[in-house]
Image (cartoon, grey):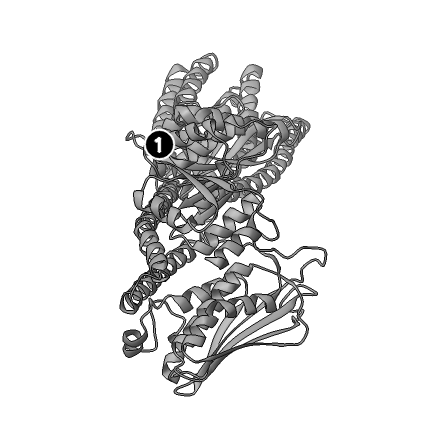
């Protein structure tokens, strides 16, 4: 029973409800025509009865028309209505046939054939409708013809044959209609399933899916746009696509879509869209080109958009955090630079004058001892300042390496020579041993010397008796760890000192860490030296370690895999080798601090060097324009005009045909970026404060060609 009343039968009922008016008009017209053959009372009763049944059918098909749930009883009610309606039309045709006149028979036959045709039409809707509206009336008509006494057998056979033929055509057509209807339903079913799946995805995805014509008009917008932007899909489709894009971003989006339309390649764009509430949303959209599968012509753009406002906010927060971090790092760098300058400036005078004072022959033994203590204490303070600056540069990533050809054995011996006076003063032995082949390597020699000096200083500091040994070894580096041909350099510093407890070994390379509090009290230090060594060796790609036993001494070592230097490369030499002094030197000292000017004069007094002074950059330029100098020592920070500006002006005034005037920066600004600024301004070298007399003389000699004489006079002094 349920199969008879399928969705096609419901569609039939819905159409009957919808098309009441035209059917009622046809019934009235048929009744009026029938007046030509039938009594008016019969026609009136038939028209009224038919209209009543049509009215009943309107109510019987209303729920189907409204697509409301329909019970079996309601289906049966519409079926009964249909039977009554078809019966009334069959009855009218039979009355016309029975008039006995030709025109009545023709009219009745036409009505019967119309009923059969009507059935064929409705056969595509429901087989039940075809049976009731077509097959049953056709069989009834043939029954009327067969029982009509006015017809002989030949007439009956003729009429019955024609009627059977008509019914056969109707049945054949209905079968084709049924088959076509089934195929159509299958196709429509697949389309409905496909559309349902598409709608399920499009309507429930968080992202917005849209189709835009090449004219910019929306063809489809998924309902998710309302959650994303606040507009309904209908509101979006009512405007062209660019309407909702922020004006500043429209050119960029137009450029992307134009490129997609030109070459057919999908592209993505990020831009801002206006929400319905007036706020701005960042949107990321991928644009793809769709073409007509039949013609290949441009059809539309398919866009897939998502709200990336949260990601953009996070990116903005990260950018702001990075800017704050960079600002903090810059502030830290400025602070360190200023503190370095402010600490080094007074230390320059303390270290310089204490060094001059302790070598004076006019002091008593006690005063000389006090001067020595001042010199040692100020040198220790300078080491602390240097350690803090070095560690800060390592922490901030501003520590740079400069690999150059380097002789490891020569480097170890030169470092040992620097601390040899300290070892001799304490009665300790100091030796440098080599094992295996010594090959020149590409390494940052000054940084390796810094690490080695730190290890040597610690070894001497914590060794009350015995001695310190430096062991230098080279061996081929394992190919899995280093480039082919590289060498593994191992340098170990062993001592016979107090050693380190096993529990403390793991922490010796941590910053601000010493073996214990008592060690810090006895020997001092910042606790940064070994941490700096570890960072420097790490930057070189090496590793550092320690082996120690308490009261038996320690061995600190490091290993680095380094490339072999080009045999043709020259080893760097100390500045100022080999020249002779043929005339007295004339030097311009540009320094705004009185005590620093006096210190340089005192340091250079024993030598044949004439020193003129200037207190700012303007005076320096005027002095250079008035007189010829062999060298200029230039401070950086000065009133009126700083040293950098003065150096640039002097370079602009120089005659290209004459020798270049050496300008050496002499400043407490010693950070790498500050040194680079000096060189970029046209200076030739850099001497950091506090001044080392030996370095000052060697620099002057190097840039004036007077190293040999300067060294000889220094020895005589």
Q: Nearer the viewer, residue 646 or 57?
A: 646
Q: Nearer the viewer, residue 334 or 9?
A: 334
Residue 566 image position (x, y, % from top left): 70, 57
The quarter of the picture where the C terminus appears is: bottom left
> In the figure, 557 relative to 185: above or below?
below
Residue located 65% across and 71% down the image: 478
The answer to whether any part of residue 378 appears in the image is yes
Q: Nearer the viewer, residue 701 or 282?
A: 701
> In the figure, 235 relative to 384: above or below?
above
Residue 563 image position (x, y, % from top left): 65, 62
Residue located 38% across and 49% down the image: 602
The answer to whether any part of residue 146 appears in the image is no
> In the figure, 707 relative to 155: above or below?
below
How many numbered marks, from 0 up? 1
Disc 1 target residue: 232
Q: Nearer the viewer, residue 651 or 606?
A: 606
| The quadrant where residue 380 appears | bottom left
Residue located 55% across and 69% down the image: 412
Query: Which residue occupies the extreme right position in the image?
Result: 568
Q: Residues within 10 Å of mark 1 (few under 14, many from 20)?
A: some
Query: Which residue occupies the extreme front position in the image?
Result: 362
Residue 394 image position (x, y, % from top left): 43, 57
**704 left or right, relative to 168:** left
Q: Is disc 1 placed on a helix, strand or loop?
A: loop
**449 left or right, relative to 314:** right
Residue 333 image position (x, y, % from top left): 36, 48
């Amino acid at each position: 029973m349920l199969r008879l009343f399928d969705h096609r039968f419901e569609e039939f009922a819905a159409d009957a409800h919808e098309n009441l008016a035209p059917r009622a008009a046809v019934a009235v017209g048929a009744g009026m025509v029938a007046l030509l053959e039938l009594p008016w009372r019969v026609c009136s009763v038939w028209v009224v009865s038919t209209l009543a049944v049509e009215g009943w059918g309107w109510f019987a098909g209303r729920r189907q028309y409204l697509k409301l749930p329909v019970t079996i009883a309601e289906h049966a009610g519409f079926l009964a209505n249909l039977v009554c309606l078809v019966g009334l039309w069959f009855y009218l045709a039979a009355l016309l046939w029975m008039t006995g006149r030709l025109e009545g028979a023709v009219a009745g036959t036409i009505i019967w054939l119309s009923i059969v045709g009507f059935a064929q039409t409705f056969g595509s809707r429901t087989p039940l409708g075809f049976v009731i509206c077509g097959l049953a009336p056709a069989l009834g008509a043939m029954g009327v013809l067969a029982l009509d006494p006015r017809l002989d057998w030949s007439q009956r056979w003729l009429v019955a044959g024609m009627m059977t033929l008509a019914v056969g055509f109707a049945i054949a057509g209905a079968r084709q209609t049924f088959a076509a209807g089934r195929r159509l339903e299958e196709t429509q079913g697949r389309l409905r399933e496909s559309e349902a799946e598409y709608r399920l995805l499009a309507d429930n995805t968080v992202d917005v899916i849209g189709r835009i014509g090449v004219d910019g008009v929306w063809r489809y917008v998924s309902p998710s746009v309302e959650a994303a932007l606040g507009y309904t899909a209908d509101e979006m489709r009512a405007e062209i696509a660019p309407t909702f894009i922020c004006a500043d971003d429209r050119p960029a989006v137009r450029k992307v879509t134009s490129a997609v339309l030109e070459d057919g390649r999908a592209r993505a764009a990020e831009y801002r869209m206006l929400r319905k509430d007036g706020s701005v949303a960042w949107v990321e959209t991928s644009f793809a080109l769709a073409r007509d599968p039949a013609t290949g012509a441009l059809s539309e753009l398919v866009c897939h958009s998502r709200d990336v406002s949260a990601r953009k906010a996070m990116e903005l927060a990260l950018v702001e955090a990075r800017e704050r971090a960079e600002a903090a790092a810059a502030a830290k760098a400025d602070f360190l630079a200023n503190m370095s300058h402010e600490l080094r400036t007074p230390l320059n005078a303390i270290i310089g004058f204490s060094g001059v004072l302790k070598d004076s022959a006019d002091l008593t033994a006690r005063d000389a001892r006090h001067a020595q203590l001042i010199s040692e204490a100020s040198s220790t303070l300078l080491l602390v300042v240097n350690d803090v600056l070095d560690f800060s540069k390592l922490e901030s990533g501003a520590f740079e390496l400069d690999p150059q050809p380097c002789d490891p054995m020569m480097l170890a011996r030169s470092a040992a020579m620097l601390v040899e006076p300290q070892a001799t003063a304490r009665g300790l032995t100091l030796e440098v041993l080599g094992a295996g082949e010594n090959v020149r390597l590409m390494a940052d020699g000054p940084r390796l010397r810094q690490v080695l000096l730190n290890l040597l200083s610690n070894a001497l500091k914590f060794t009350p008796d015995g001695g310190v040994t430096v062991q230098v070894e080279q061996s081929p580096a394992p190919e899995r760890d280093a480039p082919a041909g590289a060498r593994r350099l191992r340098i170990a510093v062993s001592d016979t000192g107090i050693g380190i407890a096993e529990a403390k070994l793991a922490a010796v390379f941590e910053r601000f860490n010493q073996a214990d509090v008592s060690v810090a009290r006895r020997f001092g230090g910042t606790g940064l030296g070994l941490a700096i060594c570890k960072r420097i060796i790490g930057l070189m790609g090496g590793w550092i370690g320690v082996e120690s036993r308490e009261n038996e001494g320690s061995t600190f070592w490091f290993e680095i895999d380094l490339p072999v230097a080009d045999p043709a490369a020259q080893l760097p030499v100390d500045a100022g080798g080999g020249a002779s002094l043929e005339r007295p030197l004339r030097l311009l000292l540009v320094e705004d601090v009185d005590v620093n000017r006096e210190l340089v004069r005192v340091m250079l007094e024993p030598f044949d060097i004439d020193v003129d002074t200037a207190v700012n950059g303007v005076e320096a330029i005027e002095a250079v324009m008035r007189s010829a100098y062999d060298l200029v020592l230039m401070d950086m920070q000065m009133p009126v005009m700083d040293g950098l500006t003065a150096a640039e002006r002097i370079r602009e005034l120089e005659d290209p045909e004459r020798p270049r005037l050496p300008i050496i920066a002499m400043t407490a600004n010693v950070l790498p970026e500050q040194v680079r600024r000096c060189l970029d301004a046209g200076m030739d070298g850099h001497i950091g404060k506090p001044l080392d007399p030996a370095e000052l003389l060697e620099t002057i000699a190097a840039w004036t060609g007077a190293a040999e004489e300067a060294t000889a006079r220094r020895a005589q002094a």
